[in-house]
C-alpha cells in the first residue's frame, strides 16, 4: 500500500460532485492488484472512495468456494455498510492497481454536518446495494445455473462495448469470473458458454465474450 499526494485533480476531477468533498477528507492510498481492502466479518469504520482502478466484492466459504457480489469501478464507493459499527458484510479485493480515498467515520460525520444533503446519497447507496443483494438471493433460490448465467451476461456490469451491428462485447472477463458471479463451477459455465457459441448466440475470445444476439430464456 503506497501513500500518494493528498489532492490530485487527475484523481478527483472525474468524481461526481457529491463525492469530491468527501474524498478530499480521506487519506489517499495506492494498492497493487489483488490487495484485500476489506475482510468479511471484520469490524471497520472507514468508507473507501475508489478514485482509480476496479475492485470486486465477494465472499468465500471454508472450502474456498467464492461468490462475487459486484464489481466496483472508479467513481463509486464502498464500505458504508459497516458504518453502524457492525461487521463487514463482504470482502473487497482490487482487480487491478487501484487508488482509494480512505475516509474515517469521524471524517464522514464532519462531512455530513457540513453537507447534510449527502445523507440522502448514502441512503440511496445502501438501498441500491440491498436491492442488488435481494435480487442475487432470489436468483440463487429460483433460477437454475443457465438462468443465472443469462442474468449476469445481460447486465454487462460496466465492461461492455456496444457495436454498430448491435452485438455487445464484454471485455476483461474470464470464465472463472463469470462462474463466481453465477455461483457455479467454472467447468459448468464453460460448457454452457460453448453450447451458446455453437448455437450462434455468442463469440468467445481470450478474456472477451461477444453477445451476438439476445440469449434464449431457456437452454
Image: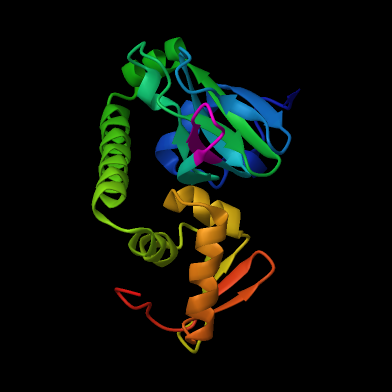
Q: Quadrant of the C terminus?
A: bottom left
In x, y percent, where is residue 177?
56, 52
Side (left or right) of 30 relative to 155? right
In x, y percent, where is residue 40?
48, 23
Eyeballing the image, is 61 above or below 209? above
Q: Which residues are magenta?
A: 56-66
Q: Residue at x 48, y 43 (%)?
A: 68
Side (left or right) of 98 relative to 196? right
Q: Residue at x 46, y 27 (%)?
A: 22
Q: In the figure, residue 117 lies in which quadrant? A: top left
Q: Residue at x 45, y 32 (%)?
A: 78
Does residue 74 belong to the magenta stretch? Answer: no
Eyeballing the image, is 187 above or below 100? below
Side (left or right) of 204 relative to 134? right
Which of the pair 64/115 is nearer the observer? Answer: 64
Which of the pair 96/21 is nearer the observer? Answer: 96
In x, y percent, where is residue 192?
48, 69
Does residue 61 belong to the magenta stretch? Answer: yes
Q: Quadrant of the N terminus?
A: top right
Q: Residue at x 43, y 21 (%)?
A: 88
Side (left or right) of 14 relative to 121? right
In x, y percent, where is residue 119?
28, 27
Amino acid at each position: 500500500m503506497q501513500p500518494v499526494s493528498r489532492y490530485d485533480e487527475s484523481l478527483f476531477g472525474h468524481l461526481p460532485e457529491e463525492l469530491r468533498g468527501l474524498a478530499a477528507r480521506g487519506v489517499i492510498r495506492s494498492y497493487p492488484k489483488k490487495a484485500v481492502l476489506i475482510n468479511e466479518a471484520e469490524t471497520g469504520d472507514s468508507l473507501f472512495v475508489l478514485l482509480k482502478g476496479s475492485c470486486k466484492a465477494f465472499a468465500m466459504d471454508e472450502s474456498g468456494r467464492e461468490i462475487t457480489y459486484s464489481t466496483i469501478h472508479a467513481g463509486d464507493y464502498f464500505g458504508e455498510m459497516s458504518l453502524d459499527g457492525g461487521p463487514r458484510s463482504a470482502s473487497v479485493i482490487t482487480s487491478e492497481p487501484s487508488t482509494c480515498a480512505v475516509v474515517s467515520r469521524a471524517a464522514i460525520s464532519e462531512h455530513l454536518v457540513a453537507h447534510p444533503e449527502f445523507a440522502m446519497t448514502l441512503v440511496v447507496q445502501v438501498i441500491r446495494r440491498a436491492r442488488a443483494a435481494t435480487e442475487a438471493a432470489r436468483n440463487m433460490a429460483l433460477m437454475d445455473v443457465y438462468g443465472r448465467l443469462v442474468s449476469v451476461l445481460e447486465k454487462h456490469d460496466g465492461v461492455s462495448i456496444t457495436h454498430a451491428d448491435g452485438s455487445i462485447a464484454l471485455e476483461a472477463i474470464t470464465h472463472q469470473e463469470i462462474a463466481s458471479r453465477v455461483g457455479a463451477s467454472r467447468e459448468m459455465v464453460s460448457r454452457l458458454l460453448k453450447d451458446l457459441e455453437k448455437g450462434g448466440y455468442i463469440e468467445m475470445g481470450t478474456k472477451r465474450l461477444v453477445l451476438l444476439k439476445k440469449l434464449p430464456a431457456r437452454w
